[in-house]
Image: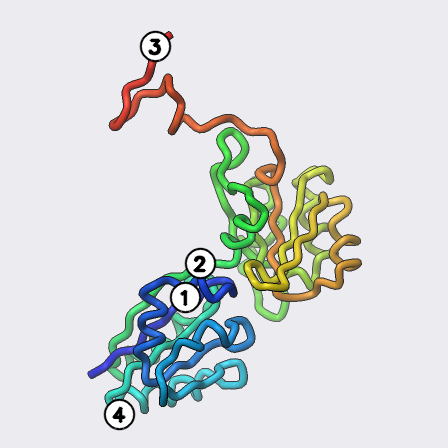
Amino acid sequence: MEKVYFIGAGPGDPELITIKGQRIVKEADVIIYAGSLVPKEVIDCHKDGAEIYNSASMSLDEVIDVTVKAIKDGKKVARVHTGDPAIYGAHREQMDMLDEYGIEYEVIPGVSSFLASAAALKKEFTLPNVSQTVICTRIEGRTAVPKRESLESLAKHRASMAIFLSVQMIDKVVETLATSYPMTTPVAVVQRASWSDQKIVLGTLETIEQKVKEAGINKTAQILVGDFLGDEYEKSKLYDKHFTHEYRKGIKE
């Protein structure tokens, strides 16, 4: 029996899907892709005759029905998600349903949009003596957030933060973050990171709300917050010539 492949298609740029993920897309008999976020170009490498479904207009039951029928017919299925499916990918519920049918599946990781956003900004989330922690979260909207994980609670750490699915509530995000972060804290909003129409807005907690509204950004964007966006940090010990580790002996002066 064939199996289902859950593929992280990357943040948007068709070249940012993994080699393995692209190979499976090329081989698949049935492709179900999240068309609201995955560009059609990502799956344009499919073979002739492949069945293509856009899950943007499908319910969970419809996705599973197509998947189960394909597997029973001996077909290879590529379930193509945006970014990495482990982050806001809603693929766990699909896998649990496939378990009920005794259908085997494999997950192929991808590049998340929060990583593509950092790349677009040419920044590093984990700068020495600035932050060694990255918090990926979202503000509560139509989907609830556990109270213990409220944005206000997480902001107290003042770690590097990547906020998903929240730019439409940028005013609330700023208001909440300001309970812990100084208003001078740098903020970047990256819309459609790695896409051809990528848009970047830079500011601080004090200015970012107005800038985002002026830019007309209200969806498909990452909000990155923290001093890692600034220019002050300590150099890493990894390449410090005075630092000894397993592969190199430090120089004494």
First reached walking from the N terminus: tag 1 or tag 3: 1
**Of helix, strand and loop, which one carries label 1?**
strand
- Measured in 3D between alpha carbons, the distance from the residue under mark 3 to the one under mark 2, in whole angstroms, is 41 Å
Rendering coords of residue 139 (x, y %): 61, 59
Numbered disc in front, either 4 or 3: 3
Spatial distance from mark 4 to mark 1, Cα to Cα?
A: 25 Å
Give the residue pinned by disc 2. 111
Q: Is residue 207 above or below residue 15?
A: above
Q: Is residue 59 left or right of residue 216?
A: left
- Residue at the spot 46% in from the left edge and 61% down from the top edge: 87
Q: Position of residue 219 (x, y in %)?
A: 65, 66
Tell which circle, 2 or 1, labels the residue nearer the N-terminal end. Answer: 1
Amino acid type of the residue tagged 3 in the rendering: Lys
Q: How many numbered marks appear?
A: 4
- Indicate the quadrant where residue 250 lies: top left
Q: Residues within 10 Å of mark 1 (few under 14, many from 20)?
A: many
| Direction from residue 195 to residue 244 in the image, left or right | left
Q: Amino acid at mark 2?
A: Val
How far apart are the alpha carbons under marks 2 and 1?
Answer: 7 Å
Q: Determine which of the numbered discs, if any, sits on residue 73 in the image.
A: 4
Q: Are marks 2 and 1 in contact (CB under 8 Å)?
A: yes
Distance of label 4 from label 3 (alpha carbons): 68 Å
Which structural element holds mark 3?
A: loop
Residue pointed to by mark 1: 8
Badge 4 density bin: few <14, some 14–19, many ≥20, Cα 10 Å: few
